[in-house]
Image (tube, grey):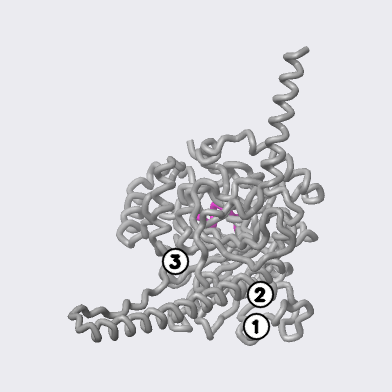
Amino acid sequence: MSLSCGVECVLLLGCSRWAWRRCTYVGSNDSETWPLATPDEFEPVPRVCRLILAVYEPDLRNPQFPPDGGYRLNPDWVLKRVTYEDTLGRSPPYLIYADHDRKEIVMAIRGLNLAKESDYKLLLDNRLGMQMFDGGYVHHGLLKSAVWLLNVESETLKRVWEETGREYQMIFVGHSLGSGVAALMTVLVVNHRDRLGGIPRSKLRCYALAPARCMSLNLAVKYADVIHSIVLQDDFLPRTATPLEDIFKSIFCLPCLLFLVCLRDTFIPEGRKLKDPRRLYAPGRMYHIVERKFCRCGRFPPEVRTAIPVDGRFEHIVLSCNATSDHGIIWIEKEAEKALEASVLCLGLTFKLLNCIMDYQQWLTCWFLQIMRENKSETITVPPKIQRLERLQTIEDEHKDALERAVSLNIPHAVSTVEEPTEKKEMEAEAAKANNGDSPKAEPELSSRGTNWDELVEKLFKRSESGKLMLKKESNPTQTQ
């Protein structure tokens, strides 16, 4: 009797401890050790949020649901608008916008439409470990959508970039479902830059808002220099490793699903998660907008933290009533705008404080020199030089450190450096392929360097009698041996 009572007490204490830890875990804990983002690197985020919202508007000259302050764009600079009728279910709607003031060419892709069957088909076209690409795993349906989108719009993007003097930045942005398409499209462009006229990697950028888990950890870290993911506080989508198709199948019982996922992840060791090469993650560098604190009511002036995490990359579900509302693009735009204003204000106050300190130091130095002259001292002192506030590490150094940490943790297929494909390597690959033409071997993955663009398209699509690309109803999974 006493033994059973003791076991019950231990079990009760263990369950209580687990419930307390899970219920008191807040979204800000994920990024509590990250440094703050600078206003310069976060400045484009509210702007690209408004561009994604513009995709929802049928007429930008007479908007029906404009955000606070309007869309702040020139309707004459919208180069192309594509709806569901144009994509035929192959991709979410999008628009292409040329921002001549900031020298940017932006492709904005909207998020999931719960009323469209075609969006669900993109999500359901995947299985764990189904699709490999560039040494890692990616979401099969989102990759097919990105390939189709790049194949259709590459000529338009290339033409606009060349007409603008090859100086503009190429930016891909998306929300929710569109974030996964935009991120994988960026990976495709990085590996097939000839499709856009040889655009350099430094001019490519992707902003994934409320990002979907669409690529394995090694790829998420590898492309952190070009892909930036923005997460608002407790957003559920970047945190749950449950496949996207299972999440949206259970959209009407999402709280129950999140609780079960939370319970399941409690018993999975962190090392086991990192060693699973098929596990998908949110892509690139992470920007976490934090606006709420534990046991505090209301919203606080938001702050933005940034890092390229390898372990602890939004692995814990937050049991919060805001887990779904923080996923909305409207809230992300509002809080990103507030965070940018707060960051600029804080920076301005910091510079004012520094100026006051320097004025005081200069007055103190002059006063000290005057005393020294009165005492006929030969010691001469000069005021200190103004020091400029800089981050402890540059963005490039942070990316290198993340790559090295991924290798040290034995992340599958992780690389310590990002190698740029050269013409020599491509010629050698083509020559080796020609020499082995008599006895070809099936490749286990869609490689970024061993597979050219035409082969990539043929593996994911089939062509109709008229030559148009058609989605394959049944795709053969490609796996490593």
Judge whether 419 appears above or below 50 on screen: above
The dominant secondary structure in magenta is: helix
Front residue of 381/351: it is: 381
Which residue in the structure is indicated by mark 3?
193
Asked whether residue 461 is drawn in magenta, I would say yes
x, y percent for residue 228: 53, 62
Which residue in the structure is indicated by mark 1?
72
The residue range painted magenta reads 456-463
x, y percent for residue 413: 44, 44
Examine the rendering and report whether any part of residue 177 can be seen: no
Binning the other alpha carbons within 10 Å of mark 3 as few (below 14), some (14 to 19) or many (20 upward) gives: some
Label 3 to label 2: alpha-carbon separation: 27 Å
6 sits to left or right of 313? right
| Secondary structure type for disc 3 | helix
| Secondary structure type for disc 1 | loop
Label 1 to label 3: alpha-carbon separation: 31 Å
Of callouts 3 and 2, which one flags the residue occurring earlier in the amino acid sequence?
A: 2
x, y percent for residue 250: 77, 47
Q: Amino acid at mark 2?
A: Arg
At x 39%, y 49%, the residue is 404
Examine the rendering and report whether any part of residue 377 can be seen: yes
188 sits to left or right of 110? left
Front residue of 106/291: it is: 291
Which residue in the structure is indicated by mark 2?
50
Quadrant of residue 60 within the rendered picture: bottom right
Asked whether residue 213 is drawn in magenta, I would say no
Of callouts 1 and 2, which one flags the residue occurring earlier in the amino acid sequence?
A: 2
Q: Amino acid at mark 1?
A: Arg
Label 1 to label 2: alpha-carbon separation: 8 Å
Of callouts 1 and 3, which one flags the residue occurring earlier in the amino acid sequence?
A: 1
Q: Amino acid at mark 3?
A: Arg
